[in-house]
Image (cartoon, rainbow, N blue to C red):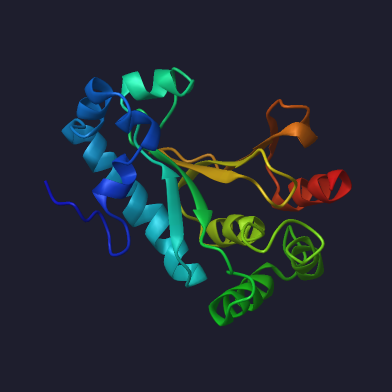
Amino acid sequence: MKDRLSAHFTLAEMLESPRGRGFPEIWKQQCNPPETVTTHLGILCHQVLEPLRERLGWPILVNSGYRCGALNELVGGSATSQHVRGQAADIRLKAGFRRSEAGQEAIASIVQEWDGRDLPGPILAGAGGTVHGSPSRDGWLWMAAALMAADLGVHQLIHEYGNPFAPNWVHIAWRDEPRGRLTAIGRWTGRSYRHWNSLGRMAEAMRRAA
């Protein structure tokens, strides 16, 4: 089994779980995923995570990738979670994206791509500005915009907890039939899932809640 799934992502980081390591039997299962799971992780990395990383020119950190059934139950995951199938990952951008030269170049390019579309450039630029979120996490909207502009096979993108425009992490899932759903959950959504089919409408809702 090859450890590297794509140029910047490895199988090891997609299996890593500090929580799971504390339970030997669970950790043993976690480190021996079925072949179908490894295949799915490879697709997720090649078709979604790697293009996103290249588009932003900035490291993407994986909080949680694959979860064996026992680990998923341990952490309170949904019984139908795509993590169990190796089709989802919880990710975040390495700190400093927006302040970096690479980040500024990516943001300028994304704003130009979105100019006149569902999410006008000025709104996009304002939403990613210093008003919302901390510098280490305010790249969320740029991630979402880059994914949608590239029309990648994203099945679900969830802004999870934290504050508007500054999630604690982003859940990204791939499936054969992508639906491109945008979702958020957190205190600002009443701790229930809210869904949007438009990045512009989602951004406006987040701006009102911030």
Q: Is residue 182 left or right of residue 79?
A: right
Residue situated in front as seen by the camera: 32 or 157: 32
Residue situated in front as seen by the camera: 173 or 137: 137
Residue situated in front as seen by the camera: 45 or 27: 27
Q: Residue furthest front?
A: 22
Q: Is residue 201 left or right of residue 171?
A: right
- Please tell me which residue is depicted at 80% across the width and 66% down the height of the picture: 126
**What x and y, as percent, mark residue 6?**
27, 59
Q: Is residue 197 left or right of residue 43?
A: right
- Does residue 180 sit above or below 149 in this rendering? above
**What x and y, as percent, mark residue 174?**
42, 42
Quadrant of the rendered image containing residue 33: top left
**What x and y, as percent, mark residue 103?**
58, 74
Q: Residue furthest right?
A: 208
Residue situated in front as seen by the camera: 174 or 79: 79
- Please tell me which residue is depicted at 47% across the width and 41% down the height of the picture: 178
- Does residue 72 sit above or below 88 in this rendering? above
Q: Is residue 98 left or right of residue 71?
A: right
**What x and y, as percent, mark residue 194?**
71, 32
Q: Residue furthest left?
A: 1
Q: How many marks?
A: 0
- Please tell me which residue is depicted at 67% across the width and 64% down the height of the picture: 135
